Each structure stands twice: as structure tokens, then as C-alpha cells.
Image: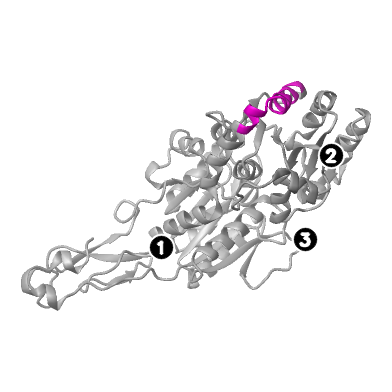
């Protein structure tokens, strides 16, 4: 829809000058886990929210935090609502509160385990949430299953119908949503996982700051649990250290709290026993603590080869892999879905699953060829720099505004709030409305309402 200057002709133009419309401050409510709860979704959403506020200081960010029954977490004032994980009534109550609030858009960070339970099929707790919410919703899918159970498929299809936009972090995920789940392609946006800006730096200085002088550093970071396949990377260090005696494998991060709650430190203990049995105590080191972003960046800058030996071939998003690309590291990874996509075109080395030898061969190949390592690092950084948080936050803000805030209005149009969906709607010029007063020459008056959808307003960023 054009401004008034496109609708008014002749002498009327001077009487109806177009107004300058600055973007209205936007209020976003994130539905996600929130720090101090320690999980990948909480970390991602916290980083995204911080970047949104840095990009647009006028924005307002709040949270509906998904919390456990025990122990409950102490949150800051940004958490305005709490959702008791696993309690469908709590999701519905939060949706009702969000509807009564002044937020413009509800941003759901979706992982199946946070929004439902398994009981012979997936029991979707977002269903009562969607039934109650009357705000525009943007849902980010952190997991997209290639071969879903029918109950998972139904849950994702419901997300596609009820969300103004669905965000995924990889083109493979977009394709799956269209081909496997039947979602409308026009509602899906690919916005990559954000990472902090990490310009190239001196690797040896970074090692010195961490007490790693003289070591060749191989690293994996993130919350530790059996899905990571770390035992295979540890096993690979036998062949790596035999060729490079200065090699050191760093396993960075504490054990996932959910795994600790269920099984204690059994997996970490198993890994420690493996290190001792293979005689690798000088070549494998555990940094057993939760890492702040600055810690992750510091260790990545000191890393020679980054490894993700993950076991799930269907993993569609990996924040740790995104960080390694953003840091411009040479990477060896098993060929799960996200890795296969982002490490294509020579940006890394892909290997088979559950193979110590394949991991060792990949690492040794990089360490033995300085030209290859330099090329992998250059290609990784060229790709990763486009995922720095300021870029990702700007694209995300553009999407929020596209679904939540109508386009600038002409002097002869008005806004209303449609009571069923709660979305803002705008009156579009058409033929004269019965009972309307006389309009200036050349300016059509309003006949009907039309929803401000992606198709009628603004293409989300791709």
C-alpha cells in the first residue's frame, strides 16, 4: 500500500503531504527456558534477546519462562510469566496472560521436550496454548524430525497453521517442513543460528592466555551427554597423539543438568575411565564447568581443530558448530544434517558416525597439511561471519515487525484489532463505504479489512 503521495493527484497533493513514519518500538515476549536454567534453548534465547536489544534499544523484551517444578529458578524482572513444564493448564494460562498483555509478538523457541510429553505418542502442550493466545506468534523450530511419528507431524502442522511465521536455521529444515510436513513455504524463514562476532586473532596469544602454550588444541564444547559421542573422539586421540605428541583434546562444559538429574555423572565417569584405560591422561582434559560466552570465544581462538562427533544423524541445529564456523576454525564432524549442510563446499571435513579411526584421520589430515587448514579456516569464517548476532538480530527484528506492526497508514485509513486472532489489521482502500463522508479528489475510501500477512506486506528476510 502506498503513502498518500501515491494516492493524491493534482492540487490535492499539497493538502495531504505524506507523513514520516518511524518504526514503532516493538515488544517481544519469548516463550522459552531462561537463564539461570542451563540448557541450549535458554542460552540461545538469551543471546538472541540481548542482541535484539543491542540492535534496537527501544525494543521491549520479556519472557514467559518454562520452568521445572523443582528446583524452581530465580529470574530477573524480564521474566513476567512462568510456565510449569509438563502441565498443559500452565501453558494455556500463560497464553491467556500474554493475550491480555501489551506485547506485540510472541516468539516461541520450540524443542519438543519443552512443549509436550511422550505417552505412546507426543502429547502437545502447545495445543491449549495456541487455542488461548491472541497475539501474532513466530515459532523457531530447533528440531525438525526427518521421519516424524504421526503425533509429531500433527504438532508441527499445528505450529505451521497457528504461527504467523516459522523460523528454522538451515535450508534442510525448511525443505523438510515443506516436503515432509506440508507447511506453506511462504511462512517459513531461514535465519541461521547467531554467534558473537569473532574476528581473526593470534592463536598463539590465545593459547598463552589459557596456559596452553606448545599444545596443538583439538576441542569440543557444550553440555556433555551421551548423544555427543565424545567417547569416539577420545578414542581417536590415540592415533592423533601418536603422530602429534603435543596434541591435547579439550572437552569443554559441564554435564547436561537433565542428564545429571536422571543418571548423575555416570557418562562423565565413563569418559574419565576411558581416558585412563587408553593412557591418554596427558592428551585429554575436561573443563568441567558451565562456560560463559567469553569463555567459549577464548577457547575457540586457541583451537587448532574443532570436532563434533555427534551421534544423531537427524540433528538439524548445532549451536556449537555455528560458533566454530563463526570463529573460523578447521572442523571435523560426523555428517548429521546441520553439519552436512554448513560444512559443504569445502568448509569442513565430514566423517562417518561412531568411528574413532575416521575422526582421527580427519584431524590428522588437517594437522599434517597447513595449506588445507588455512583453506578450511578461511572458508569457515567467510560463511560464519554472516551469522554474527548483529546481522541475525536485525533479520529477526525485521520479521517480528513484519508480522506484528502494520505498514504506515495513509491519512484516510485506520487500524483496528481483530478480536479473534488479536492481530493488528489495516483498512485497505477500495470502493466507497456506505455512510462515509466525502473524500478528497483522488483518494479512495475504505471498503473492507484484509489481514496483514507476509504475502500482503513484507517478505521476511531469507
For discs 1 and 3, the disc positioned in front in the rendered view:
1
- Per the image, the residue denoted by label 1 is 404
Task: Give the mark, 1 or 3, whose residue is nearer the N terminus.
Answer: 3
The structure residue drawn at horizontal position 72% and vertical position 56%, both measured from the top left corner, is 292
What segment is highlighted magenta in the picture? 357-374
Q: Which residue is mark 2?
A: 267
Q: Nearer the viewer, mark 3 or mark 2?
A: 2
Q: Main secondary structure of the magenta part?
A: helix
Mark 2 closeness class: few <14, some 14–19, many ≥20 residues within 10 Å: some
Name the element at disc 2: helix
Picture quarter with the N terminus: bottom left
Q: Quadrant of residue 286?
A: top right
Residue 346 screen position, x and y as percent = 56, 28
Does residue 334 appear in the picture of this structure?
no
First of labels 3, 2 by sequence position: 3
Q: Secondary structure at mark 3?
A: loop
Above or below 191: residue 65: below
Q: Dot 3 corresponds to which residue?
A: 70
Please tell me how crowded label 1 is: few (under 14), some (14-19), or many (20+) other residues with Cα within 10 Å. Answer: many
* Coordinates of residue 169 in the picture (x, y in percent): 53, 44
The reply, left or right, for residue 386 in relation to residue 365 is: left
Residue 370 lies in the magenta stretch: yes
Which of pointers 1 and 2 lies earlier in the amino acid sequence? 2
Measure the C-alpha gap from mark 1 to mark 2.
45 Å
The residue at the point 77 percent across, 53 percent down is 290
Marks 3 and 2, how far apart at CA: 23 Å
| Residue toward you, 323 or 447 | 323
Regarding residue 179, the answer to whether it shows in the image is yes
Above or below for 102 versus 149: below
Would you say residue 450 sits in the magenta stretch? no
Q: What colouring style does the render use?
A: one colour
Amino acid at each position: 500500500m502506498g503513502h498518500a503521495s501515491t494516492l493524491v493527484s493534482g492540487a490535492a497533493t499539497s493538502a495531504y503531504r505524506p507523513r514520516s513514519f518511524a518504526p514503532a518500538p516493538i515488544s517481544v515476549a519469548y516463550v522459552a527456558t531462561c537463564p539461570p536454567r542451563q540448557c541450549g534453548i535458554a542460552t540461545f534465547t538469551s543471546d538472541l534477546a540481548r542482541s535484539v536489544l543491542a540492535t534496537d534499544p527501544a525494543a521491549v523484551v520479556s519472557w514467559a519462562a518454562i520452568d521445572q517444578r523443582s528446583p524452581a529458578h530465580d529470574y530477573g524482572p524480564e521474566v513476567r510469566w512462568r510456565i510449569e513444564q509438563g502441565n498443559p493448564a500452565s501453558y494455556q494460562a500463560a497464553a491467556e496472560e500474554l493475550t491480555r498483555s501489551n506485547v506485540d509478538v510472541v516468539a516461541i523457541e520450540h524443542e519438543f521436550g519443552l512443549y509436550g510429553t511422550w505417552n505412546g505418542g507426543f502429547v502437545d502442550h502447545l495445543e491449549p496454548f495456541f487455542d488461548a493466545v491472541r497475539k501474532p506468534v513466530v515459532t523457531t523450530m530447533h528440531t525438525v524430525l526427518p521421519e516424524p511419528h504421526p503425533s509429531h507431524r500433527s504438532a508441527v502442522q499445528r505450529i505451521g497453521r497457528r504461527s504467523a511465521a516459522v523460523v528454522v536455521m538451515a535450508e534442510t529444515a525448511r525443505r523438510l517442513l515443506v516436503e515432509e510436513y506440508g507447511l506453506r513455504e511462504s511462512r517459513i524463514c531461514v535465519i541461521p543460528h547467531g554467534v558473537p562476532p569473532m574476528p581473526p586473532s593470534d592463536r598463539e596469544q590465545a593459547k598463552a592466555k589459557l596456559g596452553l602454550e606448545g599444545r596443538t588444541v583439538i576441542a569440543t564444547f557444550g553440555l556433555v551427554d551421551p548423544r555427543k559421542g565424545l567417547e569416539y573422539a577420545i578414542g581417536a586421540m590415540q592415533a592423533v597423539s601418536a603422530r602429534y605428541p603435543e596434541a591435547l583434546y579439550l572437552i569443554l562444559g559441564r554435564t547436561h543438568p537433565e542428564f545429571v538429574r536422571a543418571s548423575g555423572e555416570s557418562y562423565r565417569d565413563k569418559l574419565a575411565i576411558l581416558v585412563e584405560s587408553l593412557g591418554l591422561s596427558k592428551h585429554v582434559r575436561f573443563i568441567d564447568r558451565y562456560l560463559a560466552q567469553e569463555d567459549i570465544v577464548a577457547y575457540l581462538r586457541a583451537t587448532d581443530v574443532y570436532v563434533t562427533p555427534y551421534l544423531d544423524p537427524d540433528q538439524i541445529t548445532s549451536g556449537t558448530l555455528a560458533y566454530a564456523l563463526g570463529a573460523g576454525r578447521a572442523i571435523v564432524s560426523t555428517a548429521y544434517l546441520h553439519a552436512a549442510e554448513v560444512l559443504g563446499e569445502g568448509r569442513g571435513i565430514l566423517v562417518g558416525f561412531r568411528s574413532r579411526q575416521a575422526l582421527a584421520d580427519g584431524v590428522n589430515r588437517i594437522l599434517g597439511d597447513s595449506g588445507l587448514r588455512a583453506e578450511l579456516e578461511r572458508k569457515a569464517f567467510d560463511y560464519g561471519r554472516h551469522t554474527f548476532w548483529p546481522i541475525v538480530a536485525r533479520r529477526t527484528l525485521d520479521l517480528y515487525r513484519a508480522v506484528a506492526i502494520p505498514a504506515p497508514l495513509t491519512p484516510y485509513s485506520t487500524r483496528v484489532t481483530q478480536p479473534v486472532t488479536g492481530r493488528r489489521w489495516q483498512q485497505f482502500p477500495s470502493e466507497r463505504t456506505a455512510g462515509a463522508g466525502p473524500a478528497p479528489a483522488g483518494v479512495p475510501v475504505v471498503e473492507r479489512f484484509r489481514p496483514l500477512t507476509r504475502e500482503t506486506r513484507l517478505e521476511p528476510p531469507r
